[in-house]
Image: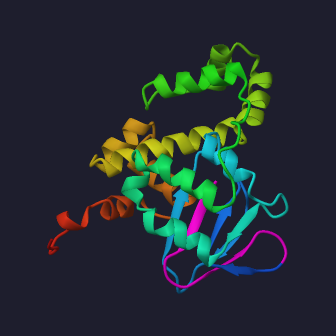
């Protein structure tokens, strides 16, 4: 799931039916939609749907269409602090809390995660980033059959296992690039076969090349020709 903010101009979006216009939006996980951002600079903020904030924000999205259009006032509360480097660090959790409040919600009780799925998530977090993770392996960790694990995972997390693993690889690669790793190092460290494979995944899932993320991660004081 993700926020899209127009830093300049406005967005036009359609998920079903007619086009709508707004300065920003929040999309549910795996929600297909069309976006027209011509004339606008945008900022995307991707959220983990299994997190407490992600679960809370999903409740603020209409079930029909799977999109929450944001008002100018809501965007005004969220855009100034939505700096990419800060969101990928500790400040990200505070920003998500503010987003929940801005959209009219307090922290809601977390989604009930199946104990076996919780074990599999811990296994994923503690494993090396480039470790392959097969369905049988994760189902065994969870103590469930393959079919039961896939069902429990989707019910617990809100998205199926395969796209979750794809996003996890992308997240790890993006974090490595922001920390200064080369594209090849980030690709192999996150489990991609090579940098080209990572680049294709970035363009398909994020609409940008990883080299662009690396360029944008340079602090203004470090950029060529900048001054304090």
Front residue (pair 171, 11): 11
Q: Is residue 29 visible?
A: no
Question: Who's the residue at 56% across and 84% down the image?
Answer: 38
Quadrant containing the C terminus in the rendered view: bottom left
- Residue 116 as seen in the image, left or right of residue 62: left
Question: Who's the residue at 65% across and 74% down the image?
Answer: 35
Relative vertical location of residue 224 with respect to residue 219 in this rendering, above or below: below
How does the figure colour the protein chain or chains?
A: rainbow
Q: Is residue 75 visible?
A: yes
Magenta-drawn stretch contains 109:
no
Relative vertical location of residue 5 with respect to residue 146 in this rendering, above or below: below
Front residue (pair 60, 107): 107
- Residue 94 as seen in the image, left or right of residue 24: left
- Residue 192 as seen in the image, left or right of residue 6: left
Q: Quadrant of residue 20?
A: bottom right
The magenta segment is 1-17
Q: Position of residue 190 (x, y in %)?
A: 43, 38
Question: Who's the residue at 56% across and 50% down the image?
Answer: 97
Q: Quadrant of residue 4?
A: bottom right
Q: Position of residue 140 (x, y in %)?
A: 66, 14
Magenta-drawn stretch contains 9:
yes
Question: Who's the residue at 28% across and 46% down the image?
Answer: 181
The number of callouts visible is 0
Q: Position of residue 147 (x, y in %)?
A: 79, 24
Front residue (pair 207, 142): 142
């Amino acid at each position: 799931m993700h926020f899209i903010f127009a830093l300049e101009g406005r967005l036009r979006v359609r998920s079903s039916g007619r086009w709508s216009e707004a300065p920003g939006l929040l999309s549910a996980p795996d929600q297909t939609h069309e976006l027209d951002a011509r004339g606008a600079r945008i900022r995307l903020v991707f959220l983990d749907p299994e997190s407490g904030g992600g679960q809370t924000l999903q409740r603020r999205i209409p079930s029909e269409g799977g999109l929450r259009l944001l008002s100018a006032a809501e965007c005004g509360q969220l855009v100034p602090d939505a700096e990419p480097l800060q969101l990928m660090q500790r400040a990200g959790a505070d920003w998500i809390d503010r987003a929940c409040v801005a959209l009219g919600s307090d922290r809601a009780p977390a989604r009930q995660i199946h104990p076996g799925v919780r074990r599999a998530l811990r296994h994923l977090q503690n494993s090396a980033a480039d470790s392959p993770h097969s369905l049988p392996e994760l189902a065994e960790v969870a103590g469930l059959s393959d079919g039961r694990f896939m069902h429990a995972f989707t019910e617990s997390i809100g998205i199926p296992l395969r796209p979750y693993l794809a996003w996890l690889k992308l997240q790890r690669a993006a974090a490595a690039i922001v920390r200064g790793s080369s594209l090849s190092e980030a690709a192999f460290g996150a489990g991609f076969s090579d940098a080209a494979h990572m680049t294709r995944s970035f363009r398909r899932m994020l609409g940008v090349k990883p080299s662009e993320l690396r360029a944008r991660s340079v602090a203004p004081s470090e950029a060529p020709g900048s001054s304090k």
